[in-house]
Amino acid sequence: MVVGAGITGLFTAMLLAQDGRDVAVIDAGDVAALATGANTGKVSLLQGSRLSSIRAHHPASLVHAYVDANRDGQELVREFAETAGVPFVRRTAFSYAHTDAGMGRVRDEFTAAREAGLDVRMARAAERDAVPFPVAGAIALDDQIALDPDTLATALAETFLAAGGTLHTRTRVTRTAVLPSPHVVTAAGSVFADHIVLATGTPIADRGLYFAKLSAQRSYVVSFEVPTGEVPGGMFLSVDAPSRSVRPVSADDGAVGTTRLVVGGNGHPVGRAESERAQYEDLVAWTQSYYPGARESFRWSAQDYESHNLVPFIGTMPRGGGRIRFATGYAKWGLTNGPAAALRIAAEIQGVAVADLPTWARALGTRMTAPSDLARGATENAKVGVAAAQGWGDALTHPAPVPKPADGEGTVGSRAGRPIGVSTVGGRTRAVSAVCPHLGGVLRWNDGECTWDCPLHASRFAPDGTRLEGPAVSDLAVLAEAPSADSPPSEG
Ligand SMILES: Cc1cc2nc3c(=O)[nH]c(=O)nc-3n(C[C@H](O)[C@H](O)[C@H](O)COP(=O)(O)OP(=O)(O)OC[C@H]3O[C@@H](n4cnc5c(N)ncnc54)[C@H](O)[C@@H]3O)c2cc1C
Ligand code: FES
């Protein structure tokens, strides 16, 4: 059984179903409802400054294994897309610096990529000059893939079903257990299986405390209609601040109507931005300053997880009897890392001996933790601790009732010593517990998405308290009445 119908879950399920296994996929939402359907569609081995970041903390052999895994993942996507008729386009990927100060990172990436066996080159002047935004320098990798991730996921689901699999959407898993035999619990009942694969982004089981070994970044994407001649041919990703991902789209790699340009960036830890809405506005302003004719067509955001040791976690969970597997920590490169994880997990379930797994699968499977990883983990967990203390402190010093929030706004106050969240969306004011059911973080209002977001481990909830994503598995408690400034205060 696979929990999660994102790219990891769908590829894993499809490979196993095509092998003749009886496979069910369960998803809390719809196919590709989270990061898989909301990314920028780059199936690329050149990944910004990813390789040099890993290389700064790990041996060259590990970076090589990471690239090999991503190459196999990319190849799986290409083969599947060709077989299933999913359109894709070959494009050159660029990792670029906005200014001279960022050129050191470009050079580091060049060195790390070459060392890992990638045929990168320095970008030509004509390629740099082909875009209107400043590019101090860039490295390039030709023949990477761009596609519409939603179309890919839909085709994966259809192929899985055609191979005999079953798919249960809008069914949330609330518990994972191995005794008396491996099963998951949902509102519709328990489902038993020989193997359970948690392909849920961050794992929904707390075994191994992986939620505390990951940090979650929320990022923003805006698509634009722009005059044809202005669109770059390649996919650009900055290595220095501000983070910018710029890619053209055509009918074959995801364009809707006359949309031709997708711009992403402004990532930040989930629940820790002053204003999420401002991140969108900044992306729009940046784009229109370089493409004056650009007209916004869509905007969306999503989150992905990075492991503290910078390399994805793929494998069995502690205390799962070898029957619970998971994969996460792709750091916004899941279109290649997800299929690679699926290859490895499916092979293990099929009983392939460790010695017969690809070399990269053995190298990446080892749980290596360098002193710097511990330091990075400690730093992130210290930030989580600060966010936890701040959330409770702020909530308790702002007693409810609070003034009724304006439409699209939410605010946290305290009632009877407990933080409550009050929001108004679409004219409707609601009150919910503002305490995250995962481990008690105090939620913050996300004014870009109109959601309650947890600054600790990135769970998110709708204004009515419905859990949307993250390690929490239950909804927020709904408070019977939305308190307003007119209500008598329940505490001082
Ligand atoms: C803005 C942005 C841009 C990106 N751009 C790129 C890119 O260009 N190229 C690239 O390679 N990567 C990119 N990524 C990263 C990529 O999108 C992710 O790494 C990848 O989609 C993760 O896939 P997944 O299957 O592991 O998780 P997800 O897509 O998050 O899927 C997890 C699934 O599990 C389900 N689930 C969760 N909890 C439960 C539960 N309790 N019960 C049942 N089901 C549950 C969810 O509903 C969801 O469908 C980007 C990410 C972001 C945020
Ligand atoms: S997600 Fe862990 S406390 Fe909220």
Image (spheres, rainbow, N blue to C red):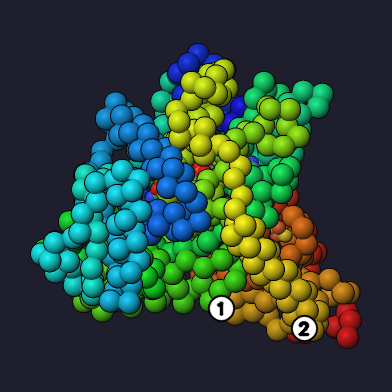
As drawn, the residue found furthest toward the top would be 20
Mark-to-mark CA distance, 2 and 1:
18 Å
Q: Where is residue 476 in the image (x, y as percent from the top left)?
A: 74, 58
Q: In this view, does 432 lie to the left or right of 241?
A: right
Question: Between 16 and 386, which is closer to the camera in this rendering?
Answer: 386
Badge 2 amino acid: His
Q: Judge whether 200 appears above or below 109 on screen.
A: above
Of the numbered discs in the image, which one, if any, rests on residue 398?
2
Q: Position of residue 458 (x, y in %)?
A: 62, 59
Q: Where is residue 77 in the image (x, y as percent from the top left)?
A: 35, 35
Residue at horizontal 61 percent and vertical 42 percent from the top:
367
**Mark 2 or mark 1: whose residue is earlier in sequence:** 1
State ligand 2's quadrant: bottom right
Which structural element holds mark 2?
loop
Residue 427 visible? The answer is: no
Q: Quadrant of residue 192?
A: top right
Q: Judge whether 379 appears above or below 114 on screen.
A: below
- Read off the residue under disc 1: 274
- The quadrant of the rendering that contains the N terminus is top right
- The quadrant of the rendering that contains the C terminus is bottom right
Q: Nearer the viewer, mark 2 or mark 1?
A: 1
Residue at horizontal 59 percent and vertical 45 percent from the top:
368
Residue at horizontal 20 percent and vertical 66 percent from the top:
226
Q: Is residue 307 left or right of residue 53?
A: right
Residue 21 visible? The answer is: yes
Q: In this view, does 350 lie to the left or right of 242?
A: right
Q: In which quarter of the image is residue 296?
A: bottom left
